Amino acid sequence: MTSKDDLINSMVELEEEKTYELVNALLNEGTNARDIIDILREAVDIIGKKYNEKEYFLTELVMAGELFQGSAEILEPHLKEDQKAEEPKGVVVVGTVKGDVHDIGKNIFVTLLKSAGFEVHDLGVDIPPEEFVKKVKETKADYVGYSGLLTVALENMKRTTELLKEAGLRDELKIIIGGLPVDEMWMEVAQADAFTDNAFQGVEKIKEWAGDK
């Protein structure tokens, strides 16, 4: 039997091939895909602590994000099977705003939202405000997530919210912004409802809004 600790250790040590092998082994042994996501989340939390303690640096953080994403791609068909019989808990539109192309944190956020039972529309990176508005209208979204790591992103977050207001959509939405530099000031300027520099905390906030605590 493959153990949870084996997977956590291989992920924390950033052993790509071994991590994917263990994810597949757990699936073959009948472990639920969402449970495997939770194990991977634990590993990413440990990696985050190592980063905060200066034991790991940005390179390791990016590698961990890519490893999590690769593992999630293995799990995604199984997550979809789990969710077929369920109504989505809400509709979320997510994207990295215009002027920024960083996506590791966004991709983890999207994967976690899907695994939590939300319908997610990922617009990608360098997305102009008009594209957010168009997708919110099209999907009747409940929540919007703006992602950005660069200071140039803040102005486009603000502009996106202003366009959502002009379209009469803002009052129906909850908006969360995410990225390493975001703080309360960013949230106020962007006229958002919440901010986070942690994908896991961001998902918990949306679950809270959806009444899924």
Image (cartoon, rainbow, N blue to C red):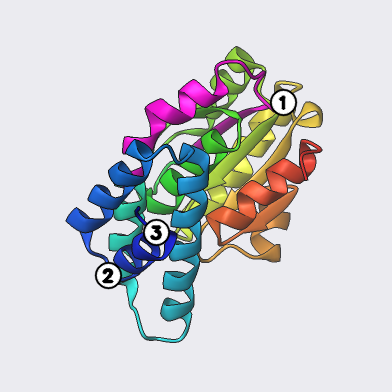
Q: Which residue is mark 2?
A: 59
Mark 2 or 1: in front is 2
Q: Which mark, residue 206?
A: none
Which mark sits nearer the N-terminus, 2 or 1?
2
Q: Furthest residue to the left?
A: 17
Towards the viewer: 87 or 126: 87
From what the image shows, is residue 57 above or below residue 40? below
Say which amino acid is labelled 2: Thr
Q: Quick check: is 93 in the magenta stretch? A: yes
Q: Is residue 156 visible?
A: no
Cα gap from disc 1 to disc 3, whole angstroms: 52 Å
Towards the viewer: 91 or 134: 91
Say which amino acid is labelled 3: Ser
Q: Which mark, residue 3?
A: 3
Which mark sits nearer the N-terminus, 2 or 3?
3
Q: Position of residue 202 (x, y in %)?
A: 62, 51
Count up the numbered dots.
3
Residue range highlighted in magenta: 71-94
Indicate left or right for 185 with 19 as reference: right
Q: Position of residue 207 (x, y in %)?
A: 71, 42
Query: Which residue is at 61% across, 22% downward?
Result: 136
Say which amino acid is labelled 1: Glu
Q: Which mark, residue 166?
A: 1
Cα gap from disc 2 to disc 3, whole angstroms: 27 Å
Crowd rating for badge 1 (residues with CA inside 10 Å; few <14, some 14–19, many 20+) = few
Q: Position of residue 183 (x, y in %)?
A: 64, 65
Q: Is residue 204 visible?
A: yes
* Marks 1 & 3, CB-CB < 8 Å contact: no
Towards the viewer: 104 or 2: 2
